[in-house]
């Protein structure tokens, strides 16, 4: 009743699937109301511009790439507070225009001086760029959230999935005047551990066998375009011309294209899952083996995961733990044979889990199988990085 004298606006929103008109407080601060915004049934959101005079100054390194563009989408979706934003890329892209939050920005060339006065830098421009400019940014007082593999296994650099191990970066905050580097895990690791961590917490995983089915987006925008072009060419009766990958990509699949470690027969992508899981979980006790495959899907990875536990765990216990874990959604309808697909996960924040079942090859109740899908560009990269940035505030 104390608000009755204040001005309100009638705006259209969607709650679940139902359009409703609700009264929203007409704030004095500049607001950017969408004509329609889908929100959960539990809340109606008033969406205001995230730009705030007291927010951090943000830089995005690699703005023209697939993940760089997704950074902008996620920052806007989550109303990340910022006071200034700088778009950085190579000299080749400098001068291009980039729209964000109703403002047109000019892309700047990445240089040694790019991070003066910057609080948070989101990097996704490849390992060599991160190795060169990440330490320079941190030295200038900036906190770097790096999406490459450059620093993931570096001693003293937190490797963080916010829902899993936020405590690893609890000592790093904006405003302390100290720069730092925080590493984003590999996309396959993020997607796997979002599903497996809640089960690990209640029954302790002893062994994990992972087979991944990885989308084009993991190799960047050029690989996504190669999949589109090869698909068009083959359907038009033309030969597929491989450029990014060594094999025909459309209507085919092949072992992941990362370098092979010839002495052990694993590729680097598979070993990232092994090593990063140990660091994130702070344990070397879990035995992990992985097989990573590139499949002709645009932007969401799928993973088949077999788990061996130290303690017994039932399907019901597993589903209960998964349902209560933030960032996880369940699609597990045996009657309708309905389980997660890459399309379910595409552009979505959550990781989707299904096919939860007891491992019948075991005589005990210490084994489970899962099927998991997650958007590689979103939770596997940009969303996870922005969530890390949120923890810095």
Image (spheres, grey):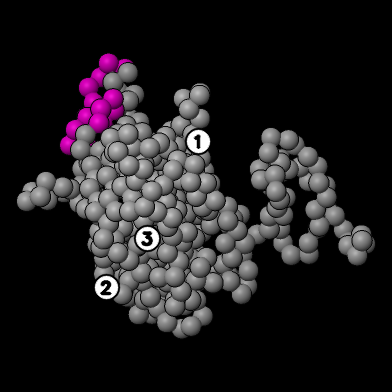
User: Quick one: SS at disc 3?
Assistant: loop
Reading the image, the residue beneath label 2 is 155
Residue 76 position by quadrant: bottom right
Residue 224 position by quadrant: top left
Q: Position of residue 149 (x, y in %)?
A: 28, 59
| Prevailing SS of the magenta stretch | loop
Q: Is residue 371 left or right of residue 32?
A: left
Whole-Å distance between the Cαs marked 2 and 1? Answer: 38 Å
Q: Position of residue 74 (x, y in %)?
A: 52, 53
Task: From the image, state whether disc 2 or disc 1 is nearer to you.
Answer: 1
Residue 156 position by quadrant: bottom left
N-term-proximal mark, 2 vs 1: 2
Residue range of the region highlighted in magenta in the rendering? 236-253
Q: Is residue 250 magenta?
A: yes
Q: Can you say which quadrant of the picture contains the N terminus? A: bottom right
Q: Position of residue 208 (x, y in %)?
A: 29, 48
N-term-proximal mark, 3 vs 2: 2
Q: Can you say which quadrant of the picture contains the C terminus? A: bottom right
Reading the image, the residue beneath label 3 is 184
Residue lying at the far bottom in this picture: please name it. Answer: 177
Q: Residue at x 36, y 56 (%)?
A: 204
Reading the image, the residue beneath label 1 is 331
Whole-Å distance between the Cαs marked 1 and 3? Answer: 27 Å
Q: Residues within 10 Å of mark 1 (few under 14, many from 20)?
A: some
Residue lying at the far front in this picture: please name it. Answer: 363
User: Quick one: SS at disc 2?
Assistant: loop
Q: Nearer the viewer, residue 281 or 3?
A: 281
Task: From the image, state whether disc 3 or disc 2 is nearer to you.
Answer: 2
Q: Position of residue 133 (x, y in %)?
A: 31, 69
Q: Residue at x 32, y 25 (%)?
A: 231
């Amino acid at each position: 009743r104390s608000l009755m004298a204040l001005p309100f606006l009638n705006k259209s929103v969607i709650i679940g699937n139902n359009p409703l008109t609700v009264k929203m407080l007409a704030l004095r601060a500049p607001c950017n109301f969408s004509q329609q915004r889908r929100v959960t049934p539990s809340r109606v959101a008033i969406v205001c511009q995230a730009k705030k005079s007291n927010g951090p100054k943000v830089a995005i390194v690699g703005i023209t790439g697939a993940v760089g563009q997704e950074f902008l989408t996620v920052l806007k979706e989550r109303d990340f507070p910022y006071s200034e934003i700088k778009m950085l890329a190579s000299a080749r892209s400098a001068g291009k225009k980039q729209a964000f939050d109703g403002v047109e920005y000019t892309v700047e060339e990445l240089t040694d001086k790019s991070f003066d006065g910057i609080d948070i830098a989101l990097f996704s421009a490849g390992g060599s760029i991160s190795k060169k400019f990440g330490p320079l940014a941190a030295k200038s007082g900036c906190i770097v959230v790096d999406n490459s593999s450059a620093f993931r296994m570096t001693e003293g650099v937190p490797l963080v999935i916010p829902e899993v191990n936020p405590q690893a970066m609890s000592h790093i905050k904006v405003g302390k005047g100290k720069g730092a580097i925080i590493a984003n895990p590999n996309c396959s690791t993020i997607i796997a551990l979002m599903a497996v961590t809640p089960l690990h917490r209640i029954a302790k995983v002893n062994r994990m066998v992972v087979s991944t089915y990885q989308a084009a987006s993991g190799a960047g925008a050029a690989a996504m375009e190669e999949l589109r072009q090869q698909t068009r060419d083959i359907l038009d009766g033309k030969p597929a011309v491989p450029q990014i990958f060594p094999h025909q990509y459309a209507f085919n699949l092949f072992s992941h294209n990362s370098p092979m470690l010839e002495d052990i027969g694993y590729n680097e992508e598979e070993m990232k899952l092994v090593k990063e899981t140990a660091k994130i979980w702070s344990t070397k006790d879990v035995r992990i083996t992985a097989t990573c495959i590139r499949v002709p899907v645009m932007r969401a990875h799928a993973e088949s995961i077999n788990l061996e536990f130290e303690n017994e765990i039932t399907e019901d216990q597993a589903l209960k733990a998964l349902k209560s874990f933030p960032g996880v959604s369940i699609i597990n309808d045996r009657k309708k044979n309905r389980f997660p697909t890459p399309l379910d996960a595409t552009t979505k924040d959550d990781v989707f889990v299904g096919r939860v079942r007891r491992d019948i090859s075991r005589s005990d109740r210490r084994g489970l199988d899962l099927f998991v899908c997650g958007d590689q560009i979103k939770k596997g990269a940009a969303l996870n990085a922005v969530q890390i940035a949120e923890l810095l505030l």
